[in-house]
Amino acid sequence: MAVTEEQLEQSNLINWTIFQEILMMDEDEEGFALSLIKTFVDQATGIFKEMADILDDPDQTQDKLEKLSSIGHYLKGSAAALGLQKVQYACERVQNYGKQNNFDNYNKALQADSLGAWYECCQDAFADAREYYAESKNLLSDYFQAKL
């Protein structure tokens, strides 16, 4: 089923103002917006694997928590540039929890008093990021009528 621009605009997954700017780039170069989305999908796949590997590793260290923060920040920026606002927010949570910063008054983060507790916060945010990513990917795949 094809997704319309109106459905994208009404979606809470996509920041329509940003995404519309990307779609306008297709006027200069047909297929440009789709190519950006495909590049993001490839990038996100690799970053999510890296995050999962860190979170699944029983050896929890401060360095690995900081690595989660760094790659969360990176993916947040890429998602923001495309208007994938829910992915952006979940990655921002990974970024901040990786710095042991409770920026959004998340209950688990309010109570986090150990490295393991911050890992749990990152795990929760990572699960949200993957869920929002899958929903966004499906929505955009239907919009572009292309396999992503």
Image (cartoon, helix red, strand yellow):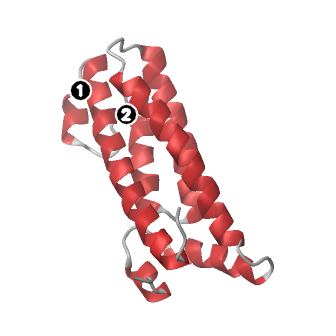
SS of the residue under disc 1: loop
**What kind of residue is marked 1?**
Ala
Q: Residue at x 64, y 78 (%)?
A: 23
Quadrant containing the N terminus in the rendered view: bottom left
Q: Residue at x 42, y 55 (%)?
A: 133
Task: Please determine whether, in this image, residue 117 is positioned above or below residue 87.
Answer: above
Horizontally, residue 4 falls left or right of residue 24, namely left
Q: Position of residue 134 (x, y in %)?
A: 39, 57
Q: Residue at x 46, y 86 (%)?
A: 4
Crowding at mark 1 (Cα within 10 Å: few <14, some 14-19, many 20+)? some
- From the viewer's side, name the closer residue of 33 and 91: 33
SS of the residue under disc 2: helix
Q: Position of residue 64 (x, y in %)?
A: 46, 20
Q: Residue at x 53, y 35 (%)?
A: 71
State the residue position of label 2: 97
Horizontally, residue 79 falls left or right of residue 126, namely right
Q: Position of residue 74 (x, y in %)?
A: 57, 42
State the residue position of label 1: 112
Q: Earlier in the sequence, mark 1 or mark 2?
A: 2
Crowding at mark 2 (Cα within 10 Å: few <14, some 14-19, many 20+)? many
Disc 1 from disc 2: Cα separation: 10 Å
Of all residues shown, which one is farthest toward the front? 147
**What kind of residue is marked 2?**
Tyr
**Cβ atoms under marks 1 and 2 closer than 8 Å:** yes
